[in-house]
Image: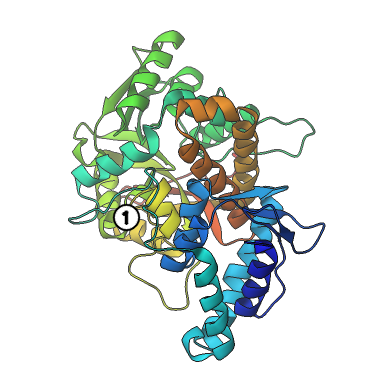
């Protein structure tokens, strides 16, 4: 096929009703589009067949993971341009005309079908989560979802996260030369200060990951920590770190569902980047369980990603790419709904801090780490899995920067019936 890029550019612009903001390089070596724009590389006609069978995000994701789509140039700039196209132009077209009823758009779609080549559609990449059955957020299904995301390999996560092994946003300073390690240490310390930890306090770390929060709380504040995770790989890694720190007498790591923890009461609970896995159908149960595990006056620090509220709220809000390749069954709720559910369970919300911009900065550092260690990361997992993480983290950074999603720390207290203060009169010294 001669000059496939020009044909694709022309057809895409007819479908979109707008100029294509990226340059296209097709499988035949041809290029078309703005000369200084990021280049969208289409390595195979299979990518087009994926898009025809699964228009939108999932089709694009499958082509990207399979290596049939790539970006030559600034990945963030390309995603900005394509995201604006998909979110804004796509929404406009949806509101104005149905493509089947528009002769121009119908002709353009037919042209793409002719270029795409013979059917049937290619099978999904092996990295995609296969069809799931049964009720959402049972203990068995949650364990499978956590294993898909976190049991990718500790070596891979070391390359991406760096020595801190903290898989949630850091707490950044604008000091020149401020590092990812400093940001993660300051975030862990921020959580400890909000929880008012002191020597001998019992802390439950829900979704303890590779043990970073547990180690920090025990080493710096003298807390006695129980960390729970559903990932055996995380637990083994955390236990090794704890032994090397000489903290085995203060920290216990369990492979356990938070719903099975029965040895309360605890003085404090940290839940950092875990509640996104709980799901709408279980969130009240999550809040009730944590409330029951705290002593009167105990504190919960809930660190959680939130989505923007919709005009018409859906019962479930699941991103196709994230669900298929990153966090199976993960759900994001608006901040207001999360605070309301915690209050319904009996908590008193004492403070809410948005740290949205901090997550964008963190994700950009993780992407840089992955790109720096790309050959090793591919060997540690697979080319497709490494591509999933690069796209997911870069796109997420832009979503935080655009305020499409946010992240918040909610400090909630199990206020005693006597009404004693849940926090000092001036409680914001942690800022």
The answer to whether residue 195 is above or below residue 68 is above
Question: Residue 141, position in %: x, y?
Answer: 23, 46
For the question of whether residue 237 can be seen, the reply is yes
For the question of whether residue 217 can be seen, the reply is no
The answer to whether residue 269 is above or below residue 406 is above
Give the position of the C terminus as an image quadrant.
top right
Question: Residue 94, position in %: x, y?
Answer: 52, 82
The answer to whether residue 8 is above or below residue 285 is below
Where residue 163 sits, quadrant-wise, is: top right
The answer to whether residue 150 is above or below residue 358 is above
**Relative horizontal placement of residue 145, taking residue 312 as reference (left or right):** left
Q: Which residue is the site of mark 1?
A: 279
User: Which element is circle 1 on?
Assistant: loop
**Relative horizontal placement of residue 237, taking residue 10 as reference (left or right):** left
Question: Residue 309, position in %: x, y?
Answer: 48, 69
**Relative horizontal placement of residue 347, taking residue 311 as reference (left or right):** left
Where residue 402 sits, quadrant-wise, is: bottom right
Residue in the image at 72% along x and 31% along y: 178
Question: Residue 342, position in %: x, y?
Answer: 35, 56
């Amino acid at each position: 096929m001669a000059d496939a890029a020009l044909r694709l550019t022309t057809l895409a612009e007819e479908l979109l009703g707008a100029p294509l903001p990226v340059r296209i390089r097709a499988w035949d070596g041809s290029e078309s589009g703005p000369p200084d724009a990021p280049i969208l590389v289409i390595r195979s006609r299979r990518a087009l067949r994926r898009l025809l069978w699964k228009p939108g995000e999932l089709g694009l994701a499958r082509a990207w993971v399979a290596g049939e789509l790539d970006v030559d140039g600034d990945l963030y700039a390309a995603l900005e341009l394509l995201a604006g196209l998909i979110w804004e132009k796509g929404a406009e077209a949806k509101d104005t005309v149905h493509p089947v009823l528009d002769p121009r758009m119908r002709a353009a779609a037919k042209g793409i079908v002719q270029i795409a080549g013979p059917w049937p559609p290619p099978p999904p990449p092996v990295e995609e989560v296969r069809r799931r059955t049964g009720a959402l957020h049972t203990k068995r299904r949650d364990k499978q979802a956590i294993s898909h995301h976190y049991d990718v390999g500790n070596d891979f996560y070391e390359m991406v996260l760096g020595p801190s092994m903290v898989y949630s946003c850091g707490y950044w300073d604008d000091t020149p030369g401020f590092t990812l390690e400093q940001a993660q240490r300051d975030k862990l310390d921020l959580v400890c200060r909000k929880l008012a930890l002191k020597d001998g306090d019992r802390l439950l770390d829900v979704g303890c990951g590779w043990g970073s929060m547990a180690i920090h709380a025990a080493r710096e504040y003298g807390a006695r920590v129980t960390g729970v995770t559903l990932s055996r790989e995380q637990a083994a890694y955390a236990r090794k770190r704890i032994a090397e720190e000489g903290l085995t007498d203060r920290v216990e790591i369990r492979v356990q569902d938070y719903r099975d923890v029965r040895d309360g009461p605890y003085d404090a609970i940290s839940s950092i980047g875990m509640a996104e896995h709980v799901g709408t159908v279980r969130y009240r149960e999550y809040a009730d369980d944590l409330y029951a595990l705290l002593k009167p006056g105990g504190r919960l620090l809930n660190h959680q990603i939130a989505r923007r509220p919709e005009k018409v709220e859906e019962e479930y809000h699941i991103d196709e790419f994230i669900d298929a390749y990153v966090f199976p069954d993960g759900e994001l709720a608006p901040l207001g709904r999360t605070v309301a559910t915690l209050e319904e369970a009996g908590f008193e919300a004492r403070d809410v801090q948005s740290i949205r911009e901090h997550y964008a900065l963190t994700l950009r550092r993780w992407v840089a780490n992955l790109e720096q260690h790309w050959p090793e990361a591919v060997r540690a997992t697979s080319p497709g899995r490494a591509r999933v993480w690069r796209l997911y983290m870069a796109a997420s950074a832009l979503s935080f920067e655009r305020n499409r999603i946010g992240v918040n720390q909610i400090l909630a207290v199990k206020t005693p019936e006597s009404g004693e203060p849940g926090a000092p009169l001036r409680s914001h010294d942690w800022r």
